[in-house]
Image: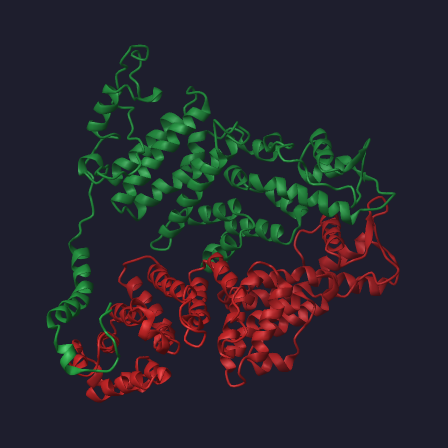
Amino acid sequence: MLLTCSQVYEAIDNHEGSFCAELLSFKHPHVANPRLQLASPEEKCQQVLEVPYDEMVAAHLRCTYAVSNHDFVEAYKCQTLVVQYPFGISGDYFGYIFSSLPIPEGFDDCRMIFQAEQQLLRKGKGKLGDMLEKAAEQLMGCFRVCASDNRAGIDDSKKWGMLFLINQLFKIYFKINKLHLCKPLIRAIDSSNLKDDYSMAQRVTYKYYVGRKAMFDSDYKPAEEYLSFSFQHCHRSSQRNKRMILIYLLPVKMLLGHMPNHQLLRKYDLMQFADVTKAVSEGNLLLLNEALAKHETFFIRCGIFLILEKLKIITYRNLFKKVYQLLKTHQLPLDAFLVALKMMQVEEVDIDEVQCILANLICEGHIKGYISHQHQKLVVSKANPFPLLSSSS
Amino acid sequence: MNNKRASCRVSHSRRRGQPVERDFRQHHNQGVWREVQEERRQESIPRGVCLSMCPIRELQDREAQNLLHRFEVLSGTERERWPRADPSGVVKEYARPAAGKDSTRPSDLRPPAVLLKTVFYLVDNIAASPTLRPWTEVYDFVFDRLRSVRQDMIIQRVSGADCVAVLERTVRFLIYASYRLCGEPLRLYDPRINDTHLQESLSWLLECYTSGKHPNQEEFQALGLLYNLGSSRATQHTMELPERIRSSPVMHLALSVSRAFMERNPVRLLRLAHSLDFLQSCALHRHLETCRRDLLLIYSHGHSSKNCRFPLHKLAHILALDVPLTNQLCQAHGVEVRGDYVVFSKTSFTEPEAGKLQCAHFHDLVDRKQRDLTVGSIIHGCT
C-alpha cells in the first residue's frame, strides 16, 4: 500500500504523467489487489503524499474498495472526487504536469458510470440518464476549464485535454440521446488550431461520433467522409472498434450507391448486411423487407434501422431500372411498374402510388424523364435515364 | 485549494503543520456523501389531505378578492359586486412556485383520488359542456386547472395508475384542442404553448408506461408517433418498443403512416390517413399541410412537361380535398390550373406565402370523422 503511494509520489515528482495516470486508473492490475481496497486509506496516503495528491489517491483507493463491494454508486462518487482535484487547483505549478494527468484515465472509466447507472435503476431510484447527465455536467465543467486555459505555453496547455473530454461527452450524449448537445463541442474543435495535432486515436474516436451525428442529421456526404477517415485510420488491431465504425459506414455508403462486398462483411462479422446489400442492388423489395425484419433487433439496437429503410428508394430505383432494361423502350407503361411492385408483394399498391413513387424518383434526380398521365406512361430521357447513384445523392 | 505552496517537493515537517485543516477537509469529503444519503432517506414526500377540488383557503381568498373565474361562480350571484363561490365548481388554479411560498402544505394538496375526480369534473362539466361558450375560454380554464393538477402530482411524486389516468386524459384533451382551436387568433389560442404542454405531458406519460402494465399504451404510443411525425427521436423511440406493442393494429397503422412520411410517399400517407380514427387524425392534422405541399412538389417535378394535363378532380381525390379547395391550394403553390386540368411544371412550383393558407380550411379529412362523437367520449377515450 505504501509502495503504491510512493510510486505515485515518484511519478508525480518525475513528471511521469502517464505512469501516474495508470496507477490511478482502473485498467491497471493494481485495482485487483485486496490490500489496496480500503475503506479509509486517508491516513496512509498522507504519510507519503502531499496535498492534494493524498486525497486524490485516497479517493481512488476508496473507489477500489467500493468496486470490490459492487457498490458502483459509491465508486462513481469517489471517482468524481479523483478527477475534480486537478481542476480545483490553480494552474501555476500544477499546470505543467497536467497534460497527461489522471484526467484521461479517470474518465475513461465511463463504464463505471454506466454500471452505477444500472444499479440505481435496479434500486428503483433515479431516472434513466440521471447519473449520466450529472457525469456529463462534470465533464463539461472540466472541458470549460480546459478550453479557457490561456495561461500556460502550448506544451503545457490544458487545451490538450479538450478532445479527450469531448469524446467522453459524446459517448454520454449518444447514450442519453441528446445529440443536439454535441454541436457546440464540434464547433469548439473546428475552431481550434490544435485539431490536427491530437493523437490519432483521439481523432479517430472524434470523427466516429461526428460521422454518426452527421448520419443522424441526414448529411450523408460529410458522414461518409468522417466515418471513412475513422475506419481507415483506426488501428489494425482494434477489430472491435473497426467493426463498430463499419456498422455506421456501411448504410451511408449504400445510400450513396456503394455496396460492400462479402469479403468485407465476413471479415468483420457483419453478415446481417449481406441480404440487405443483395436486395438493394437487385432491386428486390421483397428480400429487402425480409432482411430488415430478420435482423430488426440488431439494426434497431445500433440505431440504423431507420436509415436502412431509406434504402427502399434506392431499391425502387434499381427495380425500375430493370423494368426499363427489360422493355427496351423510352416510353414505359406505368402498368409495367405496378406489375413489378406486385411481384415484390408490396401491399396495397395502386397506379396512383406508382406515379407517386416514380415522381419522387424523378424529383430526387434518380430518373431523368417525366410522367404522362394522359398516356399512363413514364417517358425517360434517351441519354442516361438512370444516372449513377453517387452523382444524384 | 492550496495557494501557500511555493515548491512541490514533499516535506514532512511542513505538512504536519496544519492538521486541523487537513482533518476537516478529510472528514468533510468522506462525510459529505454519507450525509447526503442520510438526508435523502429522511426527506418526506408531501402528502395532500385536501378532499375538495380547491383548498378551502384558496377558495375563501379568491372569493374575498373577487378573483373567481366565471365558471366558478354560484349561479344567480354573477351580477353582484362580490359574486359567491360555487363550492362544487371552484377548482384550484395553477400558481407559479415562488420564493417564500410553501407549495407543500398538505392542506393545499389534493391526493391522487381527488385529482382524478377533478379531472373528470373538468372534462365532463366544462370541456364537454354543450352550453359553455366560447370554447377558447373553456379551453383556457381547463388548460390552467389541468396544469394545477399536474403540479400537485409532481409535488407529491404521484406515479403509477393514478398518474396515468390523469395524463391520458390531459393528452387527449390537448390533442383535441390543437385541432378544434386551429386557426383561432393568437390572442385567444397559442398553438405553441399547447404544443409545449402536450409534449411534456406525453413524455411523462410514456415514461410512466415503462413500468407496469397499461391497457391504453398502444393508443398513446401511436398518438405520440403521429403527433411527432417525422421526428427521428420519436420514431427511434417507437422502434425500441417491445415487439408485442409495435405489432398491435393501432401501432401498425401509425407506423405505416410514419413510414409513408419518411419515404416521401404522400399519396400513400393520405390514403392511410382515411383509416385513422378521429383523435389520431387530430394528432396528425398539423402535418397534412406539409404532406400536401410535398405532393404538389413531387408531382411538379415528376409530371413536368409541356403537354401535361393532369385531371383536377383526380388531384382533388388524391389530396382528400374538394375541387375548389384543391384549386386554391394549387394557386398558393404556383401550380397552374387550366379549367379541369392541372399543368405541372417544375419551374413554376413555389412555396406558399406565410399565412396565405389557413390550415383550418382544409380540415375536412378530420372533420368528417367526428360525426356523433361527444367531446366527453373523445377525452375519456371511450370511442
Total marks placed: 0
At horizontal 47% and vertical 56% (from top left) the residue drawn is B237
Residue B222 visible in the current orientation: yes
Q: Quarter of the image for the N terminus of chain B: give it.
A: bottom left
Which residue is at 26% across, 40% downward?
B112
Q: Is residue A19 above or below residue A280?
A: below
Image location (x, y in percent) of residue B77: 29, 12
Q: Colour of chain A?
A: red
Expressed as whole percent of the image width and height from the top left, the position of residue B155 reads 26, 44
Residue A79 occupies which quadrant of the picture?
bottom left
Coloration mode: by chain
Q: Is residue A43 visible?
A: no
Chain B tint in image: green
Residue B173 or B276: which is nearer the viewer? B173
In this view of the protein, which residue sits in the foreground, B46 or A223?
Answer: A223
The image position of residue A40, as x and y in percent, is: 16, 76
Q: Image point 15% across, 54% down: which residue?
A: B42
Quarter-wise, where is residue B193 in the image?
Answer: top left
Q: Nearer the viewer, residue A340 or A382?
A: A382
Residue B92, given in percent of the width and then of the height, sits at 28, 30
- The answer to whether residue B1 is above or below residue B252 is below
Q: Residue furthest front?
A: B6
Left or right of A197? Residue A312 is right
Which residue of the protein is positioned furthest toward the left in this rendering?
Answer: B20
Q: Which residue is outermost to the bottom? A: A3
Name above or below for residue B27 compared with residue B8: above
A335 left or right of B27 in image: right
Note whether A241 is above or below A224 in the view shown. below
